[in-house]
Image (cartoon, rainbow, N blue to C red):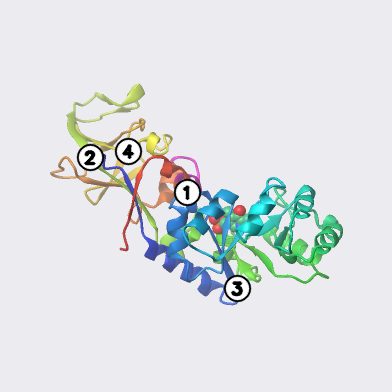
Amino acid sequence: MSRPARVIVNPNAVRSNFDLAKSLAPQARVMAIVKADGYGHGIARIANALVDRADAFGVASLEEAVQIREAGIDTRIVLLEGPFSASEVRDIEAYKLDSVIHSSNQIDYLDKASAPLSIWIKIDTGMHRLGFAPTDLEQVFARVRKKDHVIHFLTHFASAHEADDASVDEQMRAFDTALKSYEGERSVANSSAVLAWPQHRADWIRPGLMLYGVSPFKGRSAHACGLKPAMTVASELIAVREVEAGGSVGYGKAYVCPDTMPVGVVAFGYGDGYPRQASTGTPILVNGIRTQVIGEASMDMLTVDLRPIPNVQLGAPVELWGPNIPVEEVASYAATIPYELLCRVRMRARYVESLT
Ligand SMILES: *Cc1c(COP(=O)(O)O)cnc(C)c1O
């Protein structure tokens, strides 16, 4: 038997989450965001799951786009950060990719193109990460248009995951104002905007996190949003032991047993992508029963409180997160966001697919 740590991905859940996004923005086309290896789910697996549905895929690099093409998929692909060098323009043409542009040197790179491309001009409406200032738009547009590229526009919200944050409307106004006299398809909405800002969806939505069945909101669960978690991170108990009252568990004696109690050891650690910060108190499912992590995760193992679980055996199944233990909850114990946990888990776990 091999080490039981594994990631189970459910493509049906991804399809159902996609359909929810689509139903919330029935007029819009959908650019399914699959960067960071499909948020840790496997980029080709997710692209395959959505190949009959997505109007485009959004990725962060040429390498990610190539992975989708090599899976035999010819759906539109948008490079969300655009080319990183002039030499990538040749690949953009060869692989038939759409490209975002957010900087003036990328317009220079585009001069290398031998035919018109499909370009998404990114406008910075207040996030101050990537994009042209609205005041530069006229000049950018003129330079890009010289080459007959097909032009679209996008911007990105900084705080659509916060209820009623005034900046969302402000960004939208800045976007509309900047584009008043330009033609071209527009895209603004990430998952949180799709779910919570019905007035701001535009021609293309760009859901990422929600496709994987995870809520972008602090106070609203995936279940409450109608989403189905697509990833289950699972392992098994590889040791079951009795530790005496006052005995400590794991590195640094981080947990001291209040009673003589059964303790389980799970084959999964930070080397598999479990957050080390998720220490005592973090929920975990053993044999279908919710209990807690105790102490701190080590590289290959973590320890769990077996007091709530009767008759537990070696080899008992463990869910670290998934349908029963929301990754959002684990993330909050680890003082991070679920996005980070999803992307990190792929380090060395084995992947399995399951349609239920
Ligand atoms: C990652 C990304 C998204 C998806 O955001 P989610 O919050 O995961 O829905 C959308 N647009 C751009 C430009 C992105 O980089």
Residue 356 located left or right of residue 241: right
Asked if one can make out residue 6 in the rendered structure from this viewpoint, the answer is: yes
Q: Does the residue labelled 3 lie within 8 Å of ligand 1?
A: no
Q: Which of marks 3 and 4 is nearer the N terminus?
A: 3
Comparing labels 4 and 1, the label whose residue is closer to the camera: 4
Q: Which corner quadrant of the image does residue 267 belong to?
A: top left
Residue 336 highlighted magenta (yes or no): yes
Quadrant where the image shows the C terminus: bottom left
For disc 1, the marked residue is 338
Q: Residue at x 69, y 59 (%)?
A: 155
* Label 2, label 4: how far apart the Cα atoms are: 9 Å
Residue at numbered disc 4: 268
Which amino acid is tagged 4?
Answer: Phe
Of the two numbered discs 3 and 2 in the rendering, the one whose residue sits closer to the viewer: 3
Please state which of residues 44 and 153 is positioned toward the viewer in this rendering. 44
Question: Which residue is under mark 3?
Answer: 28
How far across and how far down the image is residue 153, in percent? 72, 63
Query: CA–CA distance between discs 4 and 1?
Result: 18 Å
Residue sticking out furthest to the bottom: 27
